[in-house]
Image (cartoon, rainbow, N blue to C red):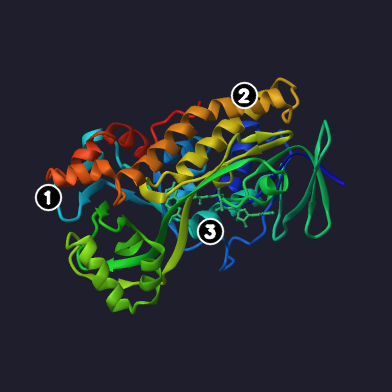
Amino acid sequence: MKAYDIVIAGGAMAGATAALALDTLSRGTLRIAVVEAMLPDHGDHPGYDARSIALAEGSCAAFAKLGLWEALAPFGTPIQHIHVSDRGHAGQTRIDASSLGVPYLGQVIELADAGAVLHQKLKNREAIDVFCPDAVVAITRSPDAVTVTLKQGQPIVASLLVAADGGRSPCCAQLNIPRQQHDFGQVAVIANVSTALPHQGQAFERFTQTGPVALLPMSQGRCSLVWCVAPSEAQQLMEASDSVFLQRLQQVFGWRLGRLLYVGERHIYPLALNQVVRPVSHRVAVVGNAAQSLHPIAGQGFNLGLRDVITLADTLSAAAEQGDDIGAMPILMDYAKRRTSDRDSTVALTSGLVHLFSNDSMLLAGARNAGLGVMSALERVKQPLVQRTMGWVEPR
Ligand SMILES: Cc1cc2nc3c(=O)[nH]c(=O)nc-3n(C[C@H](O)[C@H](O)[C@H](O)COP(=O)(O)OP(=O)(O)OC[C@H]3O[C@@H](n4cnc5c(N)ncnc54)[C@H](O)[C@@H]3O)c2cc1C
């Protein structure tokens, strides 16, 4: 039986980063196994798919501290300005990198590019073994260890299992780790869009009667679209021809980037808040989307997951250095405690925004009736929103 200090289930953004952070912070002293079901360049990869995500400035800095940003940076498109507006009302607000004294507010990266970079890095680390394609199919726990059985038959024993296996987390399901779920009744339609005017590093978030629509700046002058709508509307948008889709989008987004010219392949993601009640259990720690999957309204999902990963790596490396058992409950409780405030605040902020800007929000209805629109409602959450948009949340 192969023995490791840590076995990580899932090798997408959270799992791969967790392995690299643990290896870096422990200076290669922890033996780590990463089990990932799909090769990074697989067309149906659930983690390294067609999405682009915005990494907050604080997340780019965290990657830099881990020595990973240099390899990721060539694939990033900097966000210089964020432009928030309300369809049908004049109000708008802007956040500019220059006024905050930073070179950029964040960077947009395609998950497929990030996946290729991170997997290459995993291969080059001596203390990390990658089992891919393979999957964790069974987990048994004893007082001192956790044993996982892989699909290809191999058992692995470790002091700790890190579940980084995504929002549906088969590991958490198998271990009956309690979860809370809230369906937002919305679906995100994503696609890449080309526009007549250059994006010039601008990211747009626009609140509309049917849901928020975001355009993020991307490489080759393209923009990454995240359009949140009711499930029935999403179906129509998926079935619409390119020209009808672009016309509908132009109506809700407006003309800030001129005519919308082309749309690439479309994909849909049902949106639900799905979180474990507590991100630890006997010999198990949970990170990333497995710990909490958020609505993408403010681009917080992986930025929050990265802070899980860094705190976990910091907690475990310090414990290992002291010669402590890294899978022991007091160490895991320390990790859970350090994550509580950030998790709670980020979940509350994103869910609060979804509710605030939903059609049945009394607050927004009141503001709209008074002719104030979204912007006055937004003032109430602007400060924490800017802080989290920048990722200026110290992992504790
Ligand atoms: C439309 C949309 C837009 C978004 N925009 C942003 C944004 O701008 N900024 C941001 O920070 N976040 C954003 N997010 C969130 C972000 O994409 C996720 O938080 C992040 O990609 C989750 O990574 P993960 O590794 O935790 O989970 P996943 O990507 O779900 O990866 C889980 C991995 O585990 C593997 N796996 C599952 N079961 C097993 C098993 N039994 N054994 C082995 N492997 C297994 C899977 O193959 C998969 O690779 C967005 C999300 C959506 C849907």
Q: Quadrant of residue 96?
A: top left
Amino acid tagged 1: Ala
Amino acid tagged 3: Tyr
Callout 1: SS: loop
Q: Is mark 3 within 8 Å of ligand 1?
A: yes
Nearer-N-terminus badge (1/2)? 1
Nearer-N-terminus badge (3/1)? 3
Which residue is rendered at x = 33% and y = 32% of the image? 384
Rounded to the nearest angstrom, the CA distance separating label 1 from label 2 is: 48 Å
Circle 3 sits on which residue?
Answer: 48
Tell me if mark 1 has few (under 14), some (14-19) or many (20+) residues whose alpha carbon lies within 10 angstroms of its own: few
Amino acid tagged 2: Asp
Expressed as whole percent of the image width and height from the top left, the position of residue 132 reads: 70, 58
Rounded to the nearest angstrom, the CA distance separating label 3 from label 1 is: 38 Å
Circle 1 sits on which residue?
Answer: 90
Q: Is residue 95 visible?
A: yes
Q: Nearer the viewer, mark 3 or mark 1?
A: 1
The disc at residue 334 is 2
**Can you say whether 30 is above or below 220 in the image?**
above
